[in-house]
Image (cartoon, rainbow, N blue to C red):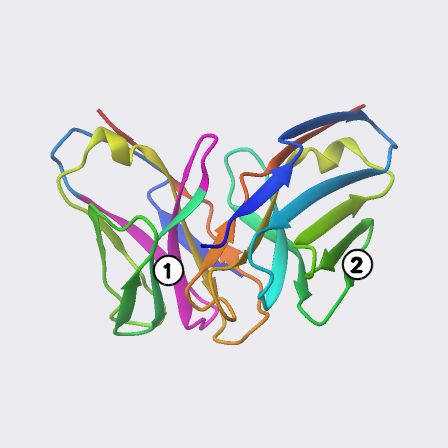
Amino acid sequence: KQEVTQIPAALSVPEGENLVLNCSFTDSAIYNLQWFRQDPGKGLTSLLLIQSSQREQTSGRLNASLDKSSGRSTLYIAASQPGDSATYLCAVPYSGGGADGLTFGKGTHLIIQP
Amino acid sequence: NAGVTQTPKFRILKIGQSMTLQCAQDMNHNYMYWYRQDPGMGLKLIYYSVGAGITDKGEVPNGYNVSRSTTEDFPLRLELAAPSQTSVYFCASSPATYNSPLHFGNGTRLTVT
């Protein structure tokens, strides 16, 4: 059974710092990995999707990497801003391409101090 | 662009009552999902559907039922509500292709007392 772990569970840093969030998964036979952002009282928003054939994906100040062989992904946030404060979750398909859903980590709760 | 719409936003039920959580998407997505999110426990998949008329159980289906009569709608039915069903429920959808992002609604916060 696929299991996803995120470290740290919570992180508080001053504005302007670069930071890294970690995600690990137990079954490396994945088609893709997604990073999501969740604001309090809201649903999840997909930030980045990395296909299994890719090593990195970038969107603005966000960069996600994927190392399938070691079962790890990282989300790098450059020049953090208070508006980046949210919970960040990673997820991988239960099986195959994900038609039967994603399994999620418990998330990293991020606070950026002004 | 409505995306995925969930109603109601909040609901309080008494033990033993029943209700239906509504989910509709206007993106013509074939795949739809129901998740529940409990504090400190992450998201757990309840049911999913890969198209109209097709549904299947996820990780935690007990106490719930679903139907998918149209591409747009995927309601979740709670029969005989129990305190253990107190949670935030999210509906999500994606196109029927590999490597497509998942789109979430804003959730329904349900309390069973």
Looking at the figure, which quarter contains the C terminus of chain A?
Answer: top right
Q: Secondary structure at mark 1?
A: strand
Quickly name the residue at label 2: A58
Query: What is the chain letter for disc 2?
Result: A
Q: Residues within 10 Å of mark 2 (few under 14, many from 20)?
A: some
Looking at the figure, which quarter contains the N terminus of chain A?
Answer: bottom left
Q: Give the image location of residue A12, x and y in percent.
A: 73, 25
Q: On residue A38, which mark appears?
A: none
Q: Secondary structure at mark 2?
A: strand
- Asked if disc 2 and disc 1 are in contact, CB closer than 8 Å, the reply is no
Q: Is residue B102 above or below residue B30?
A: above
* Residue in the image at 50% along x and 72% along y: B95
Q: Is residue A9 above or below residue A55?
A: above
Please check whether the numbered discs 2 and 1 fall on a single chain. no
When asked about the image quadrant of residue B83, the answer is top left
Q: Is residue A54 left or right of residue A34?
A: right
Q: Is residue A65 left or right of residue A3?
A: right
Extent of the magenta region: B19-42
Labels 2, 1: front one: 2
Q: Is residue A51 left or right of residue B44?
A: right
Dot 1 amino acid type: Ala
Q: How many numbered marks does the figure carry?
A: 2
* Residue in the image at 23% along x and 63% along y: B67
Q: Nearer the viewer, residue A50 or B3?
A: A50
When asked about the image quadrant of residue A82, the answer is top right
Quickly name the residue at label 1: B24
Disc 2 to disc 1, C-alpha distance:
31 Å
